[in-house]
Image: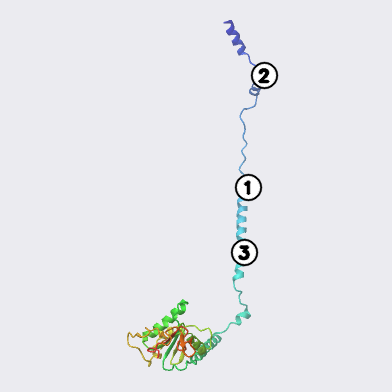
Amino acid sequence: MACQDEDFEFSGKSNPTIFSRSLTIDSAPGKSTKKSYNYPSLDRSESVKKFYSSFESVTSFGNSIKGKVKKLCTLFESPKLSSSESNDVPSPSKLKSLRSIGSESRADSVTNKSSIRLPGTEDRIVIYHTTLRGIRRTYEDCYAVRLIFRGFRVIVDERDISMDANFRKELQGVLGEKAVSLPQVFIGGKYIGGADVIKQLHEVGELAKMLKGFPVWDFGHVCESCGDVRFVPCGTCNGSRKVFDEDEEQLKRCLDCNENGLIRCPNCCS
């Protein structure tokens, strides 16, 4: 029992070195243990100023964009006519005179074309065309013009320049031009024009009047010799373009056919 009392007494003593700091803090009069937090007050005036400043910056940026757009518009817009320039605008009477001059020039060009003639073809219709499909537009125009004339069943002298180069030289000599477009049509020896002219005349009905008096084929007629190709192989060289000269004992160029060894069909092109 004596030992237990001694232990109790020893445990009941307080160590001043350990508990002195806590005791002094707790025992300090007039001081609270709670920490104080200072919250900043909301300054609305500053937030409003920031909002208006941002809004003003946006509006200034928009105004600068508008200025740039106006500059671009002035670059691309045509300048306004001044009073002196507006007086230079032609009056309706001047416009009518200009139109009359244009119509006269067109009439002159038409008369110049009508003056072109193909000698030796006063009794027939001649079409210079091509059957090659190298240039699609040219082939389609040639096919359309040939189809229009076949609808009237008139006899047409079709001269394919892709089958005979002499036809190209002949057409260039008549028109006086090296670069010649196809097709080209001559009616009664007179030059008519190309595909656009023939289509317009056909739509208006003038082409039918121009074809009156020319001979026509029977309905469904097809040449039995050439099949409407208008060319057949040469009978002298059989399309080889070579003939044997017995006197000189050597091959020579056939003079009866063209560069392709072909001649005009004697049945439909005579």
Q: Which residue is mark 3?
A: 68
Q: Residues within 10 Å of mark 2 (few under 14, many from 20)?
A: few
Q: Dot 2 corresponds to which residue? A: 17
Which of the image's four quarters has the N terminus?
Answer: top right
Q: Amino acid at mark 2?
A: Thr
Determine the secondary structure under disc 1: helix
Left or right: residue 26 compared with residue 202: right
Residue 133 vs 4, above or below: the answer is: below
Q: How is the image coloured?
A: rainbow
Q: Which mark is residue 46?
A: 1
Q: Secondary structure at mark 3?
A: helix
Q: Position of residue 116 (x, y in %)?
A: 49, 91
State how far apart marks 2 and 3 are (Cα): 81 Å
Residue depicted at x 66% and y 17%: 16
Q: Position of residue 180 (x, y in %)?
A: 51, 84
- The first of marks 2 and 1 along the sequence is 2
* Quadrant including the C terminus: bottom left
